[in-house]
Amino acid sequence: MLAAKYISWFRDIGLEDRPKVGGKGGSLGELQRAGIDVPPGFVVRTEAFEGFIDALERRSPLRARVEGLAADDLQGMGSVSRELRARIEEAPLPADLQQEICDAYWRLGESGPRAPAPAVAVRSSATTEDSADASFAGLQDTYLWVARADAVVHKIRSCWASLYSLESLSYRRRQGIAESAVAMAVVVQTMVDARTAGVMFTRSPVSGDRSVITIEGAWGLGSALVGGEVTPDRWVVAKVTGEISVRVISDKAIHHAQSPAGGVEELPVEESLRREPCLSDEELLALRAVGRQVERHYGRPQDIEWAIDRRTQKILLLQSRPETVWSNKDNQAAVARAADPLSHVMSIFGGRR
Amino acid sequence: MNAQLKPREFPLPSSVKVIPGTERAQAAYPYHIQFSKHDDQKFWFYNSMHFPEPMSAFDMVTAEAAYCALGAANTRVHCLPTTLGIDHRIINGRVYIGGNAVTDPKEIARRTVEFQKRAFYYYENWEPLYAQWKQKMLKLIGDATALPDPVLPEFEPLEHVHAGRGIASNHDLLVTYQKTLEGYFRMWHHHFEFLLLGYGAYLTFFAFCKKAFPEITDQTIARMVAGMDAEIFRPDDELRRLARCAVELEVDAHFREGSSVDDILRSLRASGEPGRLWLEELKTSRDPWFNINVGDGFYHYHRSWNDDLSMPFSALPGYARSVRAGASLDRQVERLRDERAQLIADYRELLANDEERAAYDQMIGLAHRVFPYVEGHKFYCEHWYTNLFFNKIRSFGTLLAAHGFFVGAEDVFHLTHYELESAIIDLMNAWSSGSEPRGPAYWPPIVAERKAAIAEWARHETPPALGPIPDVIDDPAIVMLWGITRESLDNWLSAGASTDSNEVRGFAASSGVVEGIARIVKSVEELSRLQQGDILVCHVTNPTWTPIFQKIRAAVSDIGGSMSHAAIVAREYGLPAVVGTGNATSKIKDGQRIRVDGGRGIVTLLH
C-alpha cells in the first residue's frame, strides 16, 4: 500500500503535529502515545482540506471571495457563506483522497465480507484550537454515529464547510485572519457505545485544589452531559489516596443513545436507573488512575472527556485539554518559604492578621 | 418551627438551674467553680470531650489540676500572644469552660515578643527538652509508685520506736495524701509543658494543607503527620507479643472466649512449666505497658489493664488464632513509614511551585519534630500516672471503709479532695485520741445523696454552650484542643432540627463503607459482648481498646477528632471509622443494623 498522503493514524502522531492534524487529532495521538486507551481512528490532515480547496479554487475563486468581504457586510457575508458551503458540500473529492479515506474507514471495522460498516464519529480538529480564540474552536462540528463510507466523506465535507459558516466568516473578517492561513483537519474515530460517559477535571473546578479529581458522569453518550441536558452524578476523588470525599447522585432523567436513523436521539432513562450512580467505586478509581497518568504526561492539570464502552466496560478517553481557569493563579504561593521556619507557627498563635 | 427565622441563642449561665434534689451535691464543689452572676458576660461551652459524664466530687480534681497547668503554660510560661488560660465551672456535674482571649493589639505585640523568646526556644531544642521531660515523668512516676499504702497499725511498729522516728503512722497518712495530690497537680504541669506548642506546630501544617489543598480531608493530613512508634502503641504490641509466646509455648488453648480471667490464670498455673513461662512474660509486659486506662483517664472508674485483665485477655484468643493461621502480627512499621513518606511526597509534587514546596518542607519538618510528644505523652500522663493516682486514692478509700466511713472503697470518690483530707484528718485524730471517728456517722448519707445526684444528672441533657455567642473564635487553645469554631457553634444551635433524621454525622476518621450490627459499648465490661464482625459504637474511642479492633468491622464514637488514637488505629487496621458524632451511643440502638461511611463521616441507621 502506498504511504498515505492525506491521513494519519492516531498512533503515528502527537502534539507536535497539531499544525497538520489539529488540536483534537494531536491530543488523541498524544494520549495513545502515552499508553492511554482512546477509540481507534485517524485524522484527515489539513493537506486534504487544502488540496480540496485548491481544486475548487482552480474552477472558480474562493478565498478571494471571502477576503473581498467587509467585516460589517453581514448580508454579503450571508450569501457568500451559502454559496461557498454549497460548493464545498457538493464538489467531489479528489479521487486519491476519496480512496484513502474509504480505505482507512473500512480498516476501523471488523474484517470479513459480511462485517458491518463501522460506526464512527466525525469531528473537526481546528489548527487554531490551542490559541486564545476558543469561541472560534467552538464553531466547529461533531457528527456522531456516522456509518457507511459515503456518509463519512459527506460529514468530512460538512466539517470543512463549517469553516464557511456565517459565524466563522464574520469572526475571520473581524480578526483580519488571512484565508490562506485557514485550514482544518478532521478526526474520524470509532464510535464508543457508551454505557456511561462524562468529564473529569484533574483539579477542583470549584476551589482549584490540585489534590482532587472531580468526575461527572451520566448514562449513555457524553453529548447529553456536555450539552447540559442532564444533571450528572458528581464525585470528588483524592488524587493521591483515592478517597472518595464527595458523592452526589442526581436524578438522571434522560440519556443520549444511537438513533436507528443515524445520529443521536434522546431517550428517557429507565426508572430503576435514574437515581443509581452511573459509575462504580472501582471505575472511579480507574478513572482517577487514568487522570493522574494524563496529568503526569502533560505536566499540568487536565480537562478530560471519557466514556465507558458498554460492551467491553473499558474506559476510553475522547479528549484531554489543559485546564485553563486556575492555572493562571498558580504562580502565587499559598504560603511562601520563611527565613525562619518557626515563624510559620505565628499563623496559628499570632491571631488574625 | 423554623430555625432560620428565629436565631437561637445559648442560655445564660445564671438561667441554668441545679436539678431539684441535687442542690447539696452541687454545693460540694468549691465556691470558685460555681457559676456566679458575673459569669453571664462570658461564653462557656460544655467540655464533653474530656468530661462526657457527670463528674463525681473527687474526679473534679482533674479539671482543677489540668486547667491550673494549662493556664500557667499559656499565660505565664510560653506567653501565648492571643490567649491566656481557661476558666472552668461545674454545674449538675458538667464541666463548662471558657477561654480568656487577648484582644488588645499592644498586649498581643508585647506577648508575641515573649512568646518568641520562649516557645521558639522549645521548638529549637525540642528533642533534648523532650528527653528531659521523659526523665522528669519517670521520676514522678517512680516517686508515686514508692508512696506507701496508707495503714494505721494498732501500735506503732517497734522498729520505728527504737529508731527514734519521732512521727507516728497517722502523720504518714497526711504526707502520703498530700504527696499524692501534689504529684497529680505536678503531672498536669508536665502534661502541658509541650502540649499547646506541639498542637500548634501540627495545626500550622494542617492549616497550610487546607490552604494549598482546600478539599483535602483531615484524615489525610493526619496520616502525613502521625507517627508509628509512640509509646501509646506499645500495650497492643505487647499483647501481640504475648499471643505469639502463647502459641510458641502451646498454651494458647487456655484462652477461650467467654472464660473469666481467673479461670484462665488458674488453668495456666495448673499447666506446669509452659504456663509458668508465659505468666513470666505477662509480668514483664504488665510493668509498665499494662498501665493503660480503658478510658481517657479522667474518671476514677477508668481502670487500667493491670487492674482488670479481662480487656487485654479478651484480645488474646483472636491474636493467637492469627498466629496459628500464620499471620505476622508485627505492626508493619516499615510499611507504614514508607506509605507516609509516599503520601508526603505525592502531595508535595502537587503543590503549585517551589516556594510552596519549601514552606511545606519547613512545616512538615516541624510537625514531625513535635509529634512524638503529642502522641507519646498520653501514656505517661493520662494513663500511667493517672492510674497510680486514682489507685492511691482508692487505697485511702479502702482504709476509710475499713474504719466505717464508707460502705465500700469506691465511695471515697464522692468526696472532694478537700473533704477527703478532712476525713483523713478525722481518722488521724480518732486514731490518736482513741475515740471513734466522726466520719462513719457523717459521710455515708452524703455519699448516698451524691451517688443519686450523679445518676440524676446523667439523665438530663445539658446545653452544649452557655452565654453570649462570640463573633469569632480564634483562641488557638480552644480551636486546637476542642476543635470549636464559629461553625461548630452554629451547628450546635441548629442541632435541634435534625433529631428525627436517621443519620448520625461526625468526623470522617478512616475511609470505607460497611454495614453491620451496632454494638453499643458503654464500659469496658461490655467489650466482651462484641461479636466478630460487629460495629463498635462507644462514647469515647480509646487507644487501650486497640486489641478489639481485630474483631470489629467499623468504629463509631461520640467523642474524638481525626487525630484521636482510635482514628489512627482504625486507619492502620483499614477499618471505617466515624468519630466525634456527639450522640451516636444515644441515637443508635444496640443490635441495630447501621451503615458506616468513614470517608464522609456519616452513619446511617438502617432500621
Image (tube, coloured by chain):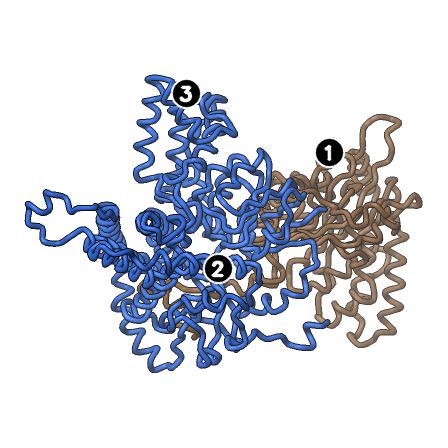
Chain colours: A brown, B blue
Residue at point 41%, 39% (across, down)? B308
Q: Nearer the viewer, residue B121 or A196?
A: B121
Marks 3/2: CA–CA distance: 43 Å
The residue pinned by badge 3 equals B251
Relative to B599, is A138 on the left or the right? right
Disc 2 marks a residue whose amino acid type is Pro
Q: Is residue B179 visible?
A: no
Tell me the number on the disc at residue A2: 1
Q: Are marks 2 and 1 on the same chain?
A: no
Relative to B268, is A233 on the left or the right? right
Up/down of B360 relative to A1, above or below? below
Q: Nearer the viewer, residue A118 or B62?
A: B62
* Residues under numbered marks 1 and 3 in contact, where contact means CB atoms less than 8 Å apart: no
Q: Secondary structure at mark 1?
A: loop
Q: Is residue B277 visible?
A: yes
Tell me the number on the disc at residue B75: none
Q: Nearer the viewer, residue B18 or B362?
A: B18
Residue at point 42%, 61% (across, down)? B446
The residue pinned by badge 2 equals B54
